Amino acid sequence: MNFNTIFLKSFRVLLLPFALLYGLIIIIRNWMFDRGYLKSAAFNFPLICVGNLAVGGTGKSPMVEYLVALLSPHFRTGTLSRGYKRKTTGYALANEATTALDIGDEPMQFHLKFPQAAVAVGEERIVAIPQMLHDRPDLQVIILDDAFQHRVVRAGMNILLTDYSDLYIHDFFLPTGDLRDQRASAKRSQVVIVTKCPPDLSEEKRRRLIRSFHLLPSQKMFFTTIEYGTPYHIATHAFRAISPEDEVLLVCGIANPKPLKDYLLQHAYTYYQKDYSDHHIFSIDDLQEIKERFHDIDARQKIILTTEKDAVRLVKFNEELKDLPLYILPIRSKFLFNEGGLFNAHVISFIRNFSFNPNT
């Protein structure tokens, strides 16, 4: 488990009784779904679920974007998210007037990057899916973002993500650990992906990891790493690479910024942090604080850097940002061991060969 300090780790261990109680509730809930006491529904339609067992960032958004980019040239594709921290409730389908306040930052990011895709939000997936198909009857596949633990809907393909530095097989229930679901639930997935791996992960380490997961014969395992692109300006979209002489003010409100910070340690002279909580809604006061912090940096060569997810919550200040060197660092998932083609073929085959089985 990843804990920031020894104090935090010790404190979380003290919460073990609550973790055991929470775990018992989750185990009973899953047992009731498995036995049919709690009902779940399957749809006669290709649904691909991207999720995880733990709280925090495992790279779900980059994987959803990878899938949309993969599938859109071949199928009319949609995404369905909860829409965390939006100012609306219920079902909503993104359109030209939609903002991050309407659907949440991650769905807005999908909408901006893939305008050809149908992007919708809804807390109750079982209600939102029929509404989405009614609004977009041309859809051929829907990607369910962060829905693995929501067992009311059964997807035809479940892609389970786990962070290389915080594998679910070594984790425990909240609040002592980070698990929001039991480890045994991983058996419901068809694909397990270890994300945020070192780009030079060895074949020997790969084999050891595969053995440690004790996967079912039908399950497939892949490994991905984070690949960063060239930063581009939030208002003008002009590109600017990070140089070794740059001093960077990092502005981010994401669950796990460690890979980003490691990247800056390797590519910039130094960096300073302006951290916010995950899904933070930026105010004009926040923007003023960012400007002041940036101007306090005594360097000839300096920029402000933020993530794509944070940018959709900052773009509302477009006029104020035009003259500020605020750049967005794009990110994507890259498959290791030349297995991207194998993964792509597996996903496309699922859609093309989809057959409805209400009992699976």
Image (cartoon, rainbow, N blue to C red):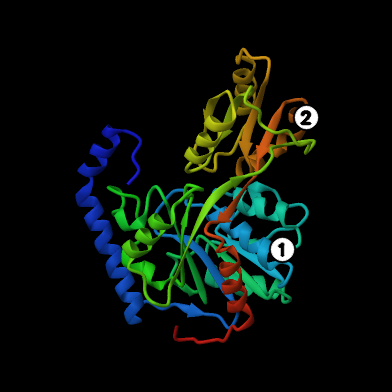
The residue at which mark 2 appears reads as: 322
* Amino acid type, callout 1: Ala
**From the viewer's perspective, is residue 278 above or below residue 30?**
above
The residue sitting at 29% across, 36% down in the picture is 8
Compare residues 304 and 312 and report the one nearer the observer.
Answer: 304
The residue at which mark 1 appears reads as: 117
**From this viewpoint, is residue 206 visible?**
yes
- The image position of residue 69, as x and y in percent, is 68, 61
- The image position of residue 229, as x and y in percent, is 66, 43
Q: Residue furthest top?
A: 298
Compare residues 20 and 341 and report the one nearer the observer.
Answer: 341
Q: Earlier in the sequence, mark 2 or mark 1?
A: 1
How many residues crowd mark 1 within 10 Å: few (<14), some (14–19), many (20+)? many
- State the mark number for residue 336: none
Horizontal side, residue 241 vs residue 147: left or right: right
**C-alpha span from label 2 to label 1:** 28 Å
Compare residues 193 and 65 and report the one nearer the observer.
Answer: 193
